[in-house]
Image (cartoon, rainbow, N blue to C red):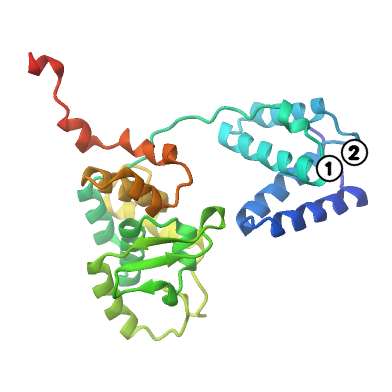
Amino acid sequence: MEKNFLDEEKKAFLERFRQELVISGYSSRTTKMYLLYVKEFFENTPKKVTEIERQDIVSFLAGKKERNASNATVSLVHSALKFFFEKILKNKVMQEIPPPKREKHLPSVLTRPEVRALIKAAKKKRSRLIIELLYSSGLRVSEAVKMQLEDLNMKEHIAKVRGGKGNKDRIVILSKDWIKKYKKYLAKRKIKSPFVFAKKNSQPFSTDAVQRLVKKSAKRAGIQKKVTPHTLRHSHATHLLEAGENIRTIQELLGHSSLATTQIYTHVSLENLKKVKSPLDRL
């Protein structure tokens, strides 16, 4: 598709869209992505915004798919356009265009020995503590980097996640072992910062920095699987399930709005699968 420069009308619509996303409580990351996709749609649609028709939207979404965008990406673009048309233009056209079905992939999960190897492979004490926090509490990486000291209740072994996905607060568990090690680390930390983990300038780490840290540690540990901070979240949930924890409790800890999202972990629990006896062995 040939891109067109945005005229003043489209720029004005984009700004209205941005403001609507902000007051609706969307995260900065979601706001950024929604704006990016709607801007791209405008650039590839020469018509005036109020003259856009169903076929223009279908053509744009089909073009994304034909250029090998994943169903998850196209679904996100669909959500962005749906919000724009319904909230800004009061147009229900997106209800006539179904989003693509999401591919169902089982999440990658580390074994307990792999988690131990990953932690051990981290070079710095701070890096080990970050990895341990991600695994032990099941935090999203965006939640971990924003966490502040005031959010930790080390006496009760819990922490408060403020403004998680969907702008929801929730409580997560803290490992007693992690708390002991973190207290020692904090006592020696020279940086004054409100954040649990901070750079030399007292600002929090970026999510990219933590992702690189985890990836490098996995490589040093010789783990062949793709390992990201989210892999540690998946591993946290799976290992809790294998230990017999109630799935609804896990749902609350992870901050899932739907139990169906949490139930994916019932399909990846190898330990539970290995406990099942073949019907042949019961004859």
Residue 7 seen in the current view: no
Q: Secondary structure at mark 1?
A: loop
Residue 29, image x, y percentages: 61, 55
What residue is shown at x 76% (from left), y 27% (from top)? 59
Q: Nearer the viewer, mark 2 or mark 1?
A: 1
Residue pointed to by mark 2:
50
Q: Is residue 277 left or right of residue 235?
A: left
What residue is shown at x 61% (from left), y 30% (from top)? 68
Q: Is residue 253 left or right of residue 242?
A: right
Residue pointed to by mark 1:
89
What residue is shown at x 34% (from left), y 61% (from top)? 131
Mark linked to residue 23: none
Residue 2 in which image quadrant: top right
Residue 75 in which image quadrant: top right
Residue 237, image x, y percentages: 32, 47
Q: Secondary structure at mark 2?
A: helix
Q: Is residue 201 left or right of residue 73?
A: left
